[in-house]
Amino acid sequence: MRKQFNEARRRASESPYHGCATAVFAAVVDTLGLRYGDEAFRAMIGFAGGVGHLVRGTCGALSGAAAAISLSYNKSREEVISALQDPHPVDQHLPEFFQEIFEKIAYVAGKMHEKYGSTLCCEIQFELYGKVLDFLDPAKHWQFSQYHKSYPINCYTVEGDVANWTVEAIIANKSRKAVEHMPNSDRLGNKQS
């Protein structure tokens, strides 16, 4: 198992794709031998840089992780629709595999919070570089690409870590309840005692 964790980390941190979402998604699914078409890979491109390079949204590495975790369940559209139409126990409003997927994503998000303090692209950038750069400005995006050469811990490191944690979540069945990863979950109306 450790070999697969390290392989996913290496693939993501050395990715030729220049996008956190595609790097993590491809690293995880290729490491685990999951089947996917080019359509799935192409769909991940727009999630880079906090979605569409807007930097204010969720880190693309987590988006790639979420897609890989979802893909690992190998459910067809028809199976998802059927599962949603089946009656569920009173305390379970979604199919069990949905909850498993969400808890595995929460595990990865929690690991990101523990190491980088956030799952938001802009906050992770600030943690790593002390500033946030506008990826939509070509000059600033070029400047950002140069940071990878001068900062020992950079976005490639984040991609490698997230790929590693995603493989852990999938093959070692790591998960956690959704609010456990939120240091300030009271913002969501969930008072912690």
Image: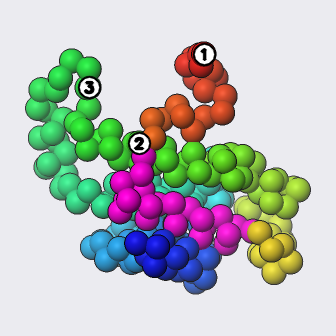
Q: Which residue is mark 2?
A: 103
Residue 55 image position (x, y, % from top left): 70, 53
Mark 2 crowd level (few <14, some 14–19, many ≥20, 10 Å Cα): many
Q: CA distance from mark 3 to mark 2?
A: 15 Å
Between disc 3 and disc 1, whose residue precedes? 3
Quadrant in which the C terminus appears: top right
Rendered residue at 59%/51% (across/down): 111
| Secondary structure of residue under mark 3 | loop
Question: As drawn, is 84 to the left or to the right of 155?
Answer: left
Q: Height in image: 92 above or below 84? A: above
Q: Quadrant of residue 180?
A: top right
Rendered residue at 51%/60% (across/down): 165
Residue 72 image position (x, y, % from top left): 30, 61
Q: Which mark is residue 93?
A: 3
Rendered residue at 66%/48% (across/down): 114
Amino acid found under the numbered disc labelled 3: His
Look at the image and tell me whether residue 8 can be seen: no
Q: Quadrant of residue 157?
A: bottom right
Between disc 1 and disc 2, whose residue precedes? 2
Q: CA distance from mark 3 to mark 1?
A: 25 Å
